[in-house]
Amino acid sequence: MVDDWPEPECGPGDVVVRVRAVGLCGTDLAVYAGKRPVPGMPWVMGHEGGGEIVAVGADVRDRLIGQRVVIEPNVPDGTCPMCRAGRSSACKNRGIVGVTRTGILADRVVVPAAFAWPVATEWSDEALACFEPLVVAYTAVLRAGVQAGDECLVVGAGSQGLLVCQSLLAVGAHPFVTEPHEGRLELAEKLGARRAAEHYGDFLFVFETSGAPPAWEPAFAAVANTGTLVVIGQTATPLPIVTNTVVQRQITIRGTLIYDHPQDYAAALQAVADGAIAAEATVQAGFPAEDAAAAFAGARDVPGKSWISMT
């Protein structure tokens, strides 16, 4: 823990946020393990979370000191062809908080005002920690075109898989789950999903969330004719695919990366406001800031979301 990090400087279009909660995900663990490079050391990690605004830039008119906010950590340039087309997730120049930009595992951080989203004062700290990955999951479900009543398979019940299950339930779909970890599978059931063994037949939508190479073939095999395989989990390992099968069965394979600014954050916030979804339901382990190392070390073993309290 570093106690002499420079105070954040609030630019005219920025806000300073006193951080209350930081969630942990696979990206953070990759940085922590040295598997994902960062600009330099020492480095501040963390990209999921939020807190309260404590300073507002001179040009900011729509954010107020004292507002509770969640932070949107992927900051596109706003000018490239992808951004102009509304697909900021594909911006080649986007800054990634905690990876290419200083992270939020700190007392106070500076954020572009448009990327600090006000939320209701009754939001719990756990909800602040979990909202960003919820947006990833909810966006994947909306992009896929899932409709109410659709039966969908979620491959992997880690944090992202659990949030996909919640997102499917929020749009009225029926999630089934396959997962080797019994604790994760039980948590998925508590959230409203069913074990895939209870279902017989193919799925119009399959969401591969694990990124585990052995999961690819069963996920692909579970897609119904004319169905869609939505790929959220990532791996650098080459995977087998037979184009004859893709064509003959008319399968769509769709990769989905994060979310597009600003519409996807707004949509997920509305879903929470409507009572359709509660990200904090996936939380299973919380740690004080002084135990951050333990939080990182044990995150992969927790059947749900881990987070760090900065208060």
Image (cartoon, rainbow, N blue to C red):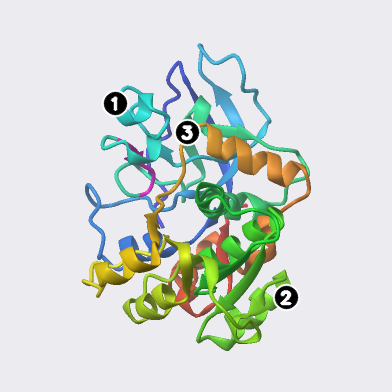
Q: Residue at x 50, y 86 (%)?
A: 180
How many marks the image carries: the answer is: 3
Q: Which of pointers 1 and 3 lies earlier in the amino acid sequence?
A: 1
Q: Position of residue 49 (x, y in %)?
A: 55, 49
* Residue behind mark 1: 80
Label 3 amino acid? His
Q: Residue at x 38, y 66 (%)?
A: 29
96 in magenta: yes
Q: Position of residue 275 (x, y in %)?
A: 78, 49
* Residue behind mark 2: 190
Q: Quadrant of residue 120?
A: top right
Secondary structure of residue under mark 2: helix
Secondary structure of residue under mark 3: loop
Q: Which of pointers 3 and 2 lies earlier in the amino acid sequence?
A: 2
Q: How far is the residue under mark 1 from the one under mark 3?
A: 13 Å
Left/right placement of residue 193 relative to residue 131 reads: right
Q: How far is the residue under mark 2 from the one under mark 1?
A: 43 Å
In this view, 208 is above or below 199? above
Between 125 and 271, the residue placed more toward the observer is 271
* Residue behind mark 3: 261
How dense is the environment of label 3, judged by Cα within 10 Å: few (below 14), some, or many (20 and up)?
A: many
Look at the image and tell me in which quarter the N terminus lies: bottom left
Q: Residue at x 50, y 11 (%)?
A: 59
Label 2 amino acid? Lys
Residue 90: give its label: none
Q: Which residues are magenta?
A: 94-98
Left/right placement of residue 53 relative to residue 241 reads: right
